[in-house]
Image (tube, helix red, strand yellow):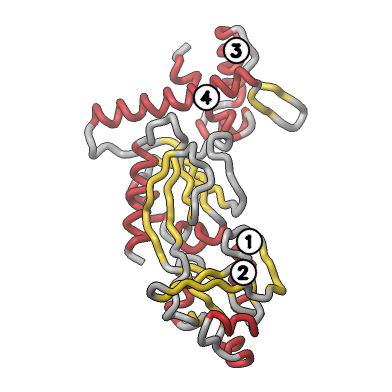
Amino acid sequence: MDRLHAMDIFVRVIETGSFSAAARDLRIGQPAVSKMIAALEDRLQVRLLVRSTRHLHPSEAGQKFYERAKRTLAEADEAEIAARGEGAGLEGRLRVCASVTFARLHIVPRIGEFLSMHPGLSLDLVMDDGYVDILHENIDIALRAGELADSSLTARKLASTERHVVASPAYLAAAGTPKTPKDLLDHTAIVYSRSLIAEEWRFRRGTSDTSVRVPTRLAVSAAEGVREAVFAGLGLAIGSRWMIPEIADGRVLAVLTDWDLPRVDLWALYPTGRLPTAKALAFVNWFADIITSR
């Protein structure tokens, strides 16, 4: 039995969640997948998969084998690419994670370009506003904006942008435009409850610092909700130009622009202990060019 081929099949079974899905992905019959996994378990003398009527999960030994197998396959791919030269095409599957709004606005509309450049590559785009364990979810790259809470990950800073206090023209026409941070006390705030600056808005102008606790009537756990609430004229919010690009065309207005809010950084995170694959590096380099040009 070809060990790398068996590893590849096992990895596909774990990542797709079933024999049938792995078979479709690999374009082979399901019996061949089942036979290969059974032979692999027989050779290793250990159960790698825990099966039930509806679900398939790696056993403890299977999870350890999966992590090492994926690393081995990635290193084999790297060796092959290095041997063929830098012009060789990228192949296989790449799993990228980003928040829902960021991915919808900045990745999905452009991802066709990257896939066209690498026709042998498949991409899984995991869109999630919550914390995603990139090791457990087998993520190759996570794009995260803001402060990094997990110091165990390898991080590369890609870009930085401003935050602004924003509102719809209709809201400002009805409620007035704040001229100073203290004027915000007479307004209604929409806050992104996952943000570290949700409760207290901190401003700086020159050497002067001030902070305001803006009255909040609406707290939303997803950036999509914050955006829609701003568009609906429900109040003021803090948003970056990545989160609310409509600032550029006037559909949303920035106020207090002579005061600075803490900037937001964008990071590419890789699982620590693994060398980033050529696929991951190619994606990050491609996306860094896109996001810094905006």
Question: Which element type, helix, strand or loop, lies under badge 4?
Answer: helix
The Cα–Cα distance between marks 2 and 1, rounded to whole angstroms, is 7 Å
Q: Residue at x 62, y 58 (%)?
A: 194
- Amino acid type at circle 4 is Ile
Q: Are marks 2 and 1 in contact (CB under 8 Å)?
A: yes
Question: To which quarter of the image does residue 36 belong?
Answer: top right
Q: CA distance from mark 2 to mark 4?
A: 42 Å
Which label lies toward us, 1 or 3?
Answer: 1
Q: How many neighbours does mark 1 have within 10 angstroms: few (below 14), some (14-19), or many (20 or more)?
A: some
Q: CA distance from mark 4 to mark 3?
A: 13 Å
Mark 4 and mark 3 lie on one chain; the one further toward the N terminus is 4
Residue 187 placement (x, y as % from top left): 64, 82
Amino acid type of the residue that numbered disc 2 sits on in the rendered structure: Val
Q: Which residue is label 2 attached to? A: 226
Q: Residue at x 35, y 54 (%)?
A: 288
Q: Residues within 10 Å of mark 3 (few under 14, many from 20)?
A: some
Q: CA distance from mark 3 to mark 2?
A: 49 Å
Identify which residue is drawn at 49% across, 37% down.
152
Q: Is residue 75 left or right of residue 218?
A: left
Residue 104 in the image: above or below residue 56: below
The crowd level at tag 4 (other Cα within 10 Å; few <14, some 14-19, many 20+) is many
Gap in angstroms between the C-alphas marked 1 and 4: 36 Å
Query: Residue 22 vs residue 143: left or right?
Result: right
Q: Which amino acid type is shown beneath numbered disc 3?
A: Glu
Q: Is 208 on the left or on the right of 229, as rendered?
A: left
Q: Which residue in the structure is indicated by mark 3?
A: 41
Residue 9, numbered circle:
4
SS at badge 2: helix
Assess whether mark 4 and mark 1 are in contact (beta carbons under 8 angstroms): no
Determine which residue is flagged by label 1: 222
Q: Which mark is residue 268?
A: none
Label 1 vs 3, first from the N-terminus: 3
